[in-house]
Image: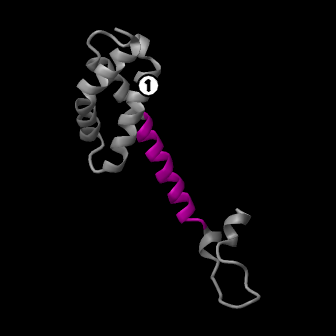
Amino acid sequence: MSNDEIFAAAYREHYWAVSRYVARRLDGRTGEVEEVVAEVFTVAWRRRADLPAAPLPWLYGVARNCLANAVRGYGRRRRLLDRLGNDDTAHGRHVVASPGSERPGAWVHEA
């Protein structure tokens, strides 16, 4: 059996198990589940020559690492949004509908 066939079999057999594993750990963030599962199987595809005979525990390990990356990324996005939302220069601007006023959102380009 070729590496491609081994990967295809692992994908068919274990996609839903990995998906449920990820969904349980990303409780409430269903939009990210498919992204993380796709990343798990992308890693598995790249390392298909390393897939063991029983790939599910290995896939769970990859999923754990992908989940850690997703959680870190979520935290970085949340902190960035908090910083942008509390920026005094953003709150100090007002949009005025007049021909001589600056364009709405021009402060973004200044930042």
* Vertical arrangement, residue 82 with respect to residue 65, above or below: below
Left or right? Give the position of 63 relative to 82: left
Residue under the point 55% across and 65% down: 86
Task: Provide the residue designation for mark 1.
Answer: 43
**Is the magenta region chiefly helix, strand or loop?**
helix
Residue 22 in the magenta stretch? The answer is no
* Helix, strand or loop under label 1: helix
* Vertical arrangement, residue 71 with respect to residue 109, above or below: above
Residue 81 in the magenta stretch? The answer is yes
- Residue 63 x, y percent position in the rendering: 35, 29
Label 1 Cα neighbours within 10 Å, binned few <14 / some 14-19 / many ≥20: some
Quadrant assignment for the C terminus: bottom right
Residue under the point 27% across and 41% down: 23
When asked about the image quadrant of residue 4, the answer is top left
Looking at the rendering, the stretch of residues picked out in magenta corresponds to 69-87
Compare residues 83 and 8 and report the one nearer the observer.
Answer: 8
Compare residues 89 and 103 and report the one nearer the observer.
Answer: 103
- Residue 110 x, y percent position in the rendering: 73, 65
Type of amino acid at the residue the image marks with label 1 = Val
* Vertical arrangement, residue 45 with respect to residue 107, above or below: above
Quadrant assignment for the N terminus: top left
Q: How many marks?
A: 1
- Residue 108 x, y percent position in the rendering: 67, 66
Compare residues 43 and 78 and report the one nearer the observer.
Answer: 43
Residue under the point 39% across and 35% down: 38
Compare residues 101 and 88 and report the one nearer the observer.
Answer: 101
